[in-house]
Amino acid sequence: MANGTLRISQPKNEKVLSYATNTIERGEVQQEYDRLYNQQIEIPLYIGNEKVFSGNKESISPPHNHQHQIGTYHKASQHHVQQAIEASLKRKTKWAQMPWESRASIFLKAAELIAGPYRSQINAATMLCQSKTIYQAEIDAACELIDFLRFNVYFMRQIYADQPISTDGVLNKLAYRPLEGFVYAISPFNFTAIAGNLPASAALMGNTVVWKPSDYQVYSANVIIEVFKKAGLPDGVINAIYGDPEMITNTVLDSRDFAGIHYTGSTQVFQEIWKKIGNKIHQYKSYPRIVGETGGKDFIIAHPSASVKALSTAIVRGGFEYQGQKCSAVSRVYLPESIAERVLDLVISELRTVKLGSPRDFENFMTSVIHHKAYNRLESIIKEIKASKEAQIIFGGRCNQQVGYFVEPTVVITTNPKFKTMEQELFGPLVTIYSYPDNEFEKTLKLVDETSPYGLTGAIFSQNRDAINKALQELQHSAGNFYINDKPTGAVVGQQPFGGSRASGTNDKAGWSLNLLRWVSPQLIKETLVPDIDYRYPFLSKDES
Ligand code: NAD
């Protein structure tokens, strides 16, 4: 037994590399992209100590070049899902009993591997299979995932150190047990970091996990698994399975040992899963933890005092980076009439310089959307806008899926603040603008609050402190992450813990200790050093006569 408590210093956020012309990192990632692009890989399921090649295969192609195949992945049958559950339960006790310092060192090693030898591979994989530019891949797949892994270890140490008081002759201790059973992680396509964090955060706290990544992120998920294995993660701690999401989920939720779900994805899917859990609640050993970060309809509201340049930059970056496929992406903007024209002129002149194409060409600021379903959804909404009397496209609006699923950055103005594109999450490069009379700022704040069911991110642009404070007050439930004079995207682990409420999720704040607390079930242990040996309290003594 190695006595002593490991000191974990507060981590610093991983430095974002520039990838500017002639940098070493640029050459490395381009070379890696080309290597991956020109090879075929076959991705198995990872169940216990086995790589499972089920034979039921699906091909993988870059969304920006959908005719080109880069590999295949194997899909799970119901039997494989059962095996993954069994593998996680089999490993459970040993993993939970492993000293926390050892769990910490495995995940810290994973962070070091991503920061070093795997950086270009995980970035290139994310560029290829999720169509991210190198900058978007770097801030996600490398930096954010590294930060999640390092900061979570730091938060875990803080949680374990958070103890009740002991008194004379009595020792009190909270034992932060992992949940009883296994955790199910379901991740979305759009962030490699989220995909890695959903299973890893629960595993770090001593849980074993069945992980189902999105079908559209399997390629970079495979790199994550490889890194975890290389870092020494024991077999069976995280079991990765791919395939029919409904069948996999139904099978998992049927297990009596299902102890919690760590989900990120659309609201509708989460609500259906929650209902299923509710319907089966009598069969579980414990009440399952339900943690879900879901959709958004993220806003910017500008006050007449807003800086026009800062605001237009925030609209371009916040609305169109990663093709608007961030849960936090700006998709509805409220501009005061006095500055609307100047802001829109600037946005449009900036968008004219934006290039759209493959992420392999580093001059492209935007690439394609993720798949044909997203493409079709966006194409059909653009058709609806074109046919509407209440809205008009003032920039973009063209789509082309010959080579990849390309949708131009599209700016819409509407006269109806409740127009469909002001209310619904569309998850693409489409920003809708509504102009309001300058003297209706407060009324417009109410409109922002009431227009959509979500509550994920939002921003106020203003140089006037009273206006900022008014917005903070009126919009306190409209956004879990609220920004003042900044775009509402780009949350950094440890700096801006992320998550929304209302239809946007359970707001358990990824990248903070609050999230990790969901993966433990504390047990209080009281030890009395010299126990009483007489049940009689002094008050039971007789009154003196
Ligand atoms: P999605 O809902 O299509 O898929 C998310 C995950 O759920 C995937 O793994 C998918 O395979 C699985 N899934 C799909 N149907 C299912 C079903 N019937 N039963 C069980 N699982 C099912 O979402 P997506 O397109 O991958 O990601 C985009 C969505 O995720 C957007 O709504 C976005 O706002 C949200 N998102 C939210 C956050 C956040 O932090 N709030 C972060 C990233 C993405």
Image (cartoon, helix red, strand yellow):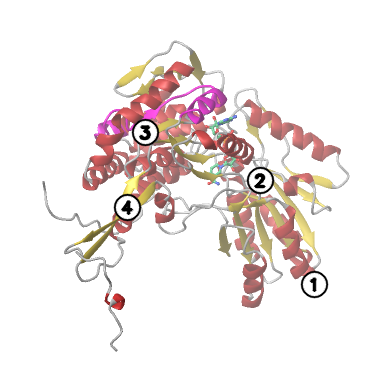
Is residue 261 part of the magenta span, yes or no? no
Circle 4: is it few (<14), some (14-19), or many (20+) Cα within 10 Å? many
- Residue 352, label in figure: 2
Marks 2 and 4, Cα distance to the nearest angstrom? 47 Å
Task: Tell which residue pokes out farthest to the right in this image.
Answer: 389
- The residue type indicated by label 3 comes to Ile
Circle 1: is it few (<14), some (14-19), or many (20+) Cα within 10 Å? few
- The residue type indicated by label 4 comes to Met
Circle 3: is it few (<14), some (14-19), or many (20+) Cα within 10 Å? many
- The residue type indicated by label 2 comes to Arg
Is residue 252 part of the magenta span, yes or no? yes
Viewer-proximal residue, 371 or 521?
A: 521
- The residue type indicated by label 1 comes to Asn
Q: Quick check: can you spot residue 92?
A: yes
Looking at the image, tell me whether mark 1 or mark 3 is earlier in sequence order.
3
- The residue beneath circle 4 is 156
| Magenta residue span | 228-255
Residue 434 vs 472, above or below: the answer is above
- The residue beneath circle 1 is 439
Q: Nearer the viewer, mark 3 or mark 2?
A: 3
Question: Residue 399 location in percent, x, y?
Answer: 70, 31
- The residue beneath circle 3 is 224
- The residue drawn where x is 58% and y is 51% is 317
Which quadrant holds the C terminus? bottom left
Marks 2 and 1, Cα distance to the nearest angstrom? 32 Å
Marks 1 and 4, Cα distance to the nearest angstrom? 49 Å
- The residue drawn where x is 71% and y is 41% is 396
Marks 1 and 3, Cα distance to the nearest angstrom? 52 Å
Q: Using the rendered view, name the quadrant where residue 450 is placed.
A: bottom right
Marks 3 and 2, Cα distance to the nearest angstrom? 37 Å
